[in-house]
Image (spheres, grey):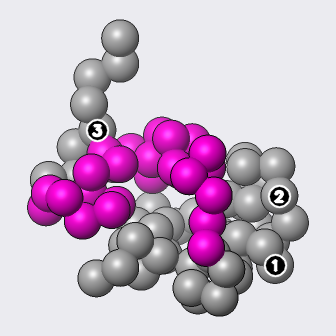
Amino acid sequence: MYYNEKMAWERNCKNITQKEMAQKLGIKQQQYARYEKGINIMPITYLPKICEILEVSSDYIIGLTTKKEPYPKK
């Protein structure tokens, strides 16, 4: 599964809409939808906030691990 598919999957599991995600990231819903569909490449700067919202680790999103748990906050 690619990072965009994992983002969509986790967002749907948590019953968060694309619009809600976009608002939390400070972007338009259409732009976020393009990231999830793989039309546009998502800037890496959004990854920490997305992981925080979805409560998963960045390693999980990018496919380095199958463990979803986020790292403890410092």
State yes or no: residue 52 in magenta. Answer: yes
Picture disc at residue 66: none
Amino acid at pointer 2: Ile
**Observer-nearest residue: 14 or 35?**
35
**Observer-nearest residue: 58 or 10?**
58
Picture disc at residue 27: 2
Residue bearing the label numbered 3: 70
- Residue 9 relative to residue 8: left or right: left
Mark 3 closeness class: few <14, some 14–19, many ≥20 residues within 10 Å: some
Helix, strand, or loop for circle 1?
helix
Residue bearing the label numbered 1: 30
Mark 1 closeness class: few <14, some 14–19, many ≥20 residues within 10 Å: few
Helix, strand, or loop for circle 2?
loop
Helix, strand, or loop for circle 3?
loop
Where does residue 53 sit, x and y in percent of width and height?
Answer: 52, 46
Mark 2 closeness class: few <14, some 14–19, many ≥20 residues within 10 Å: few
Amino acid at pointer 1: Gln
* Residue span colored magenta: 41-66
Amino acid at pointer 3: Pro
Q: CA distance from mark 2 to mark 3?
A: 24 Å
Where does residue 69 sit, x and y in percent of width and height?
Answer: 22, 43
